[in-house]
Image (cartoon, grey):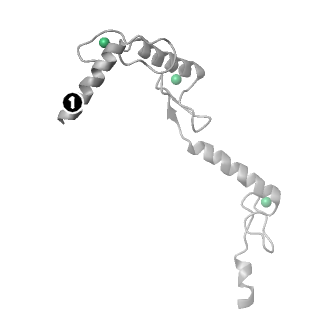
Amino acid sequence: MGYYTWQAQESHCVICSRSLTGRQERYCSNACRQAHKRQAALTNDAALGKRTCDFCERSFWPESKRQRFCSPVCADGKRSQAEDARWDAVCQLDGCEDNAGWDGTGRARRYCSRAHQQKAYRLRKKAEGTA
Ligand SMILES: [Zn+2]
Ligand SMILES: [Zn+2]
Ligand SMILES: [Zn+2]
């Protein structure tokens, strides 16, 4: 008996279930190894899971790890929303309600004017000095 116990652990290809021989451990052939890799990749994608669109809040299946919107329309919507927020930004100096006056490119402006920017800067320095 004892000599042949390894036969009791006869294994099968994880893809096609053909019995394996010799040194084959999980796959009977290269084709099955490739097939298993592809399967694993698919499972990986599913593991991405459903996501909630950053704009319309509908849930969707992302096609990539970085996808944040359910559709290009929502991506555009979010972009113009962010742009609107920049157009609408108000001067951050206490007591000033003026529009910060974004010029349509780059980062949002934080103050309506250079004077207010400097005033805010001086106030901040003063606050730090007394802290
Ligand atoms: Zn196989
Ligand atoms: Zn959406
Ligand atoms: Zn201002």
Q: Nearer the viewer, residue 110 or 123?
A: 123
Q: Residue 9: which quarter of the image?
A: bottom right
**Is residue 97 rendered to the left or right of residue 105?**
left
To which quarter of the image does residue 123 belong?
Answer: top left
Please name the residue shown 50% across and 12% down the image: 104
Q: Quadrant of the N terminus?
A: bottom right
In the rendered image, residue 114, in percent from the top left (x then y), is placed at 36, 14
Find numbered disc 1 in the image and state the secondary structure of the residue it sits on.
helix
Q: Quadrant of ligand 1?
A: bottom right
Which residue is more in the foreground, 130 or 10? 130
Label 1 Cα crowd, 10 Å radius (few <14 / some 14-19 / many 20+): few
Instruction: Let me know if residue 121 appears in the view.
Output: yes
Left of 100 or right of it: where is 72? right
Q: Which residue is at the front of the view, 34 or 92?
A: 92
Quadrant for residue 112, please give it: top left
Residue 90 visible in the current orientation: no
Front-lying residue, 3 or 124:
124
- The quadrant the C terminus occupies is top left
Residue 54 in percent (x, y) is at 48, 27
Left or right? Give the position of 40 relative to 66.
Answer: right
Q: Amino acid at mark 1?
A: Ala
Give the residue at x 26% y 27%.
124
Residue 40: x and y in percent read: 66, 51
On the image, numbered disc 1 is attached to which residue? 127
